[in-house]
Image (cartoon, helix red, strand yellow):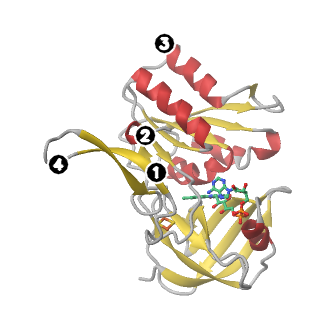
């Protein structure tokens, strides 16, 4: 089994102007990824950008790996320029994964965060109440797939171009406040922008819910060596059982953390 491997591109399909679906065939035997894990992908064979970029596993099937990505800057623009039969260097699967839901669960995706959550929806079909928010309808990628895999779906966009206008965390709060379901046993799984995760953390504290969120910190090495991706987490002192905070690496101890452990600044 190889964690550092070369892979051949067999698809790099535009979904719209900003989003692409990248399909790779590893050229050696690889470990099977779990939902929430990620890979470091080489964006270009040129020297710049030098660093690989992190992407969540979107699908692993029949020997292929798929990644859903948004074109943001230099790395993802280079990635978008790669074509069929190009070969890239890959490291993965890396990091921890989402703990398995025991029963129905709530998934909260902000924008491209859907890439990390879709494998969970796919593994636990029709078990998720999905809350999916994006800036506008163009950014609600893979919506039909997400709908077909979920029990129920609530959608918001910032501009109201699809679903309810507003923030997905407000819709989740209303859902939890309504007595339609007994939510106390439901765990929340989330991936999206930091303000969304922070708001979710406050909702979960308030309601006594457990929430596992994937953190998309900037990464350099992706394998725990550079400490460039640390976040502050609360941990118990083993000696006197008091609480202390320490830095943990999103690429190694994460990317999935229980949000109750995060020290928000
Ligand atoms: C564990 C993990 C999983 C990820 N999974 C996916 C995925 O499945 N699909 C996807 O499209 N993206 C994902 N990302 C984010 C992706 O890695 C970045 O968008 C990418 O590295 C940007 O590279 P770039 O060279 O194009 O942009 P850069 O030129 O490096 O930056 C362009 C802009 O994007 C911002 N940016 C860069 N990296 C991040 C980041 N990690 N978080 C927030 N803002 C960032 C920069 O601040 C800058 O404003 C993931 C990140 C992590 C850490
Ligand atoms: S990116 Fe280097 S330690 Fe996490």
Residue at numbered disc 2: 263
- Split into quadrants, the picture shows ligand 1 in the one at bottom right
Of the two numbered discs 2 and 3 on the same chain, state the one appearing first in sequence.
Answer: 3
N-term-proximal mark, 1 vs 4: 1
Q: Sequence-wise, which precedes: disc 1 or disc 2?
A: 1
Q: Gap in Å between the C-alphas at discs 1 and 3? A: 36 Å
Could you classify mark 1 by the number of other residues whose Cα lies within 10 Å: few (under 14), some (14-19), or many (20 or more)?
Answer: some
Residue shown at 42%/26% (left/top)?
Answer: 205
Q: Secondary structure at mark 4?
A: loop
The residue where tag 4 is placed is 238
Residue 183 visible in the current orientation = no
Q: In terms of secondary structure, where does tag 2 sit?
A: loop
Q: Residue at x 51, y 20 (%)?
A: 176
Question: Residue 49 location in percent, x, y?
Answer: 71, 76
Image check: 97 left or right of 107? left
The numbered dot on residue 231 is 1
């Amino acid at each position: 089994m190889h964690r550092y491997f070369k892979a051949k591109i067999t698809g790099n399909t535009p979904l719209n102007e900003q989003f692409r679906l990248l399909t790779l065939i590893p050229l050696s035997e690889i470990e099977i990824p779990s939902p929430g894990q990620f890979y470091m992908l080489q964006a270009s064979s040129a020297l710049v950008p030098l660093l690989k970029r992190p992407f969540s596993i979107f699908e692993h099937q029949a020997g292929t790996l798929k990644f859903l990505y948004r074109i943001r800057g230099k790395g993802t623009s280079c990635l978008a320029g790669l074509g069929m039969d190009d070969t890239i260097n890959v490291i993965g699967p890396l990091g921890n994964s989402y703990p398995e839901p025991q029963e129905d669960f709530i998934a909260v995706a902000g924008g491209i965060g859907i890439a990390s959550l879709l494998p969970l929806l796919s593994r636990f079909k029709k078990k998720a109440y999905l809350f999916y928010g994006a800036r506008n309808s163009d950014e609600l990628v893979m919506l039909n797939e997400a709908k077909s895999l979920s029990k129920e779906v609530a959608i918001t966009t910032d501009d109201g171009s699809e679903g309810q206008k507003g923030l997905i965390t407000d819709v989740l709060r209303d859902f939890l406040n309504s007595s339609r379901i007994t939510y106390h046993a439901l765990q929340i799984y989330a991936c999206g922008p930091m303000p969304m995760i922070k708001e979710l953390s406050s909702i979960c504290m308030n309601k006594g819910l457990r929430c596992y969120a994937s953190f998309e910190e900037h990464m350099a090495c992706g394998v725990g060596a550079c400490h460039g991706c640390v976040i502050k987490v609360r941990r118990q002192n083993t000696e006197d059982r008091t609480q202390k905070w320490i830095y943990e690496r999103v690429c190694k101890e994460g990317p999935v953390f229980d949000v109750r452990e995060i020290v928000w600044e």
